[in-house]
Image: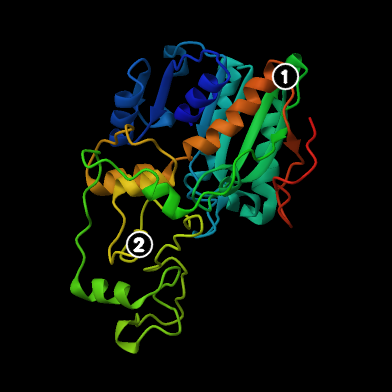
Amino acid sequence: MSLGLKMAARELKTTVEHRWAVDIDSDATKTYKRNFPESEVHNVDIRRLKLSQLAPVDALAFGFPCNDFSLVGQQRGVEGDFGPLYKNCISAIKHFSPKWFVAENVGGIRSANSGRAFVQILSEFSELGYRITSHLFRFENYGVPQRRHRVMIVGIRNDLNKIFAVPAPRFPERTAREALEKPRIPKKAKNQELTRQSNAVIERLKALKPGQNAFSPDLPEKHRLNIRGATISQIYRRLDPNKPAYTVTGSGGGGTHVYHWEEPRALTNRERARLQAFPDDYVFDGGKEAVRRQIGMAVPPLGAAEVFRAVLMTVAGKKYAAIPEYLGGRHSSLPNQKPRG
């Protein structure tokens, strides 16, 4: 998100100073410091963070843990181990009283605790004195070459008398091929290590067509997985080069690394970063799995930039094309919609 804000500020020819960042993951904090050397970086459990030791800020951006909201998990929501950590974000907003904030989470947050968790979180943000706008962004509509859907919550402090409107998409859809080949990744690019794969995996991938996975009905019997009741679409799924990639994840066992449409192999971390819309000069620290985790858990910078661009324009009182908020049902964020805002 910090990179997205920097991109937005550059486009609008304004200046943003990154004061500090906080994360419990030591590799993530090293990566952040490498790419944002001007910022303080605190590698600490946010529950032990002393807000009084941090410099004052005009804005906050945060992604509170999605573990308890994800559709892949049990969706324990605010009753889980990580769900309640949004309270620490509440504390930070109370302490700093920023002009605006942007929060991010998975789409599953809308249904956790039978929908009660999301209503509670939005209500608590609003009670702090902010006008709240929440939207399920489909980032493939915003130039990100990946089908990645995330809820973004924007709060503008009431006394500013501004209301954030969801920005309309500005860019055409980008395919996986365009992301990985236009231009090709430089040979000297970092985070390009290949994943070791068994002969069985290589032969399975050779038998799959672009867009197919390990449960495709025409996959020869000898290459099928003997897992009863499991048909997870991303297991050994090869990319379709003519469509945006499927969602890049930060963890998972065999078959979840994202697979090339032509070569029988998993993508490198740099290729995954391309699908997340990171520039090639953004280097990640840590071992290969640590880097994979950071990439998969990130908000695509290009998608974040579109959100921050709209926030900065809102606060500055500038007009931009906008669309209605969307949180469920038929998705309405399409480029041909009549702009508003």
Tell me what residue is drawn at x 38 percent, y 35 percent.
279
Residue at 22% in and 44% down: 287
Position of residue 153 relative to residue 162, above or below, is below
Q: How many marks?
A: 2
Q: Which residue sits at x=33%, y=34%? A: 28
Q: Position of residue 19 (x, y in %)?
A: 44, 15
Q: Secondary structure at mark 1?
A: loop
Q: How is the image coloured?
A: rainbow
Query: In the picture, residue 322 is in which quadrant?
Result: top right
Q: Is residue 224 left or right of residue 103?
A: left
The quarter of the displayed image where residue 59 is located? top right
Q: Is residue 185 visible?
A: yes
Residue 276, compared with residue 11, is above or below; it is: below
> At numbered mark 2, what does the secondary structure look like: helix, strand or loop?
loop
Locate residue 202 relative to residue 122 in the image: left or right: left
- The disc label shown at residue 318, or none: 1
Q: Which mark is residue 168?
A: none
Decide which of 164, 189 is in the foreground and name it.
189
In the rendering, at what x and y percent does residue 257 appear? 34, 58
In the picture of the structure, the residue carrying the numbered disc 2 is 259
Are there few (<14), some (14-19), or many (20+) residues within 10 Å of tag 2?
many
Q: Is residue 337 left or right of residue 246?
A: right
Looking at the rendered image, the quarter that the C terminus falls into is top right
Question: Could you tell me how far apart the alpha carbons at marks 1 and 2 are, in whole angstroms?
Answer: 43 Å
- Front residue of 157/178: it is 178
Residue 298, image x, y percentages = 44, 41
- Tell which circle, 1 or 2, labels the residue nearer the N-terminal end: 2
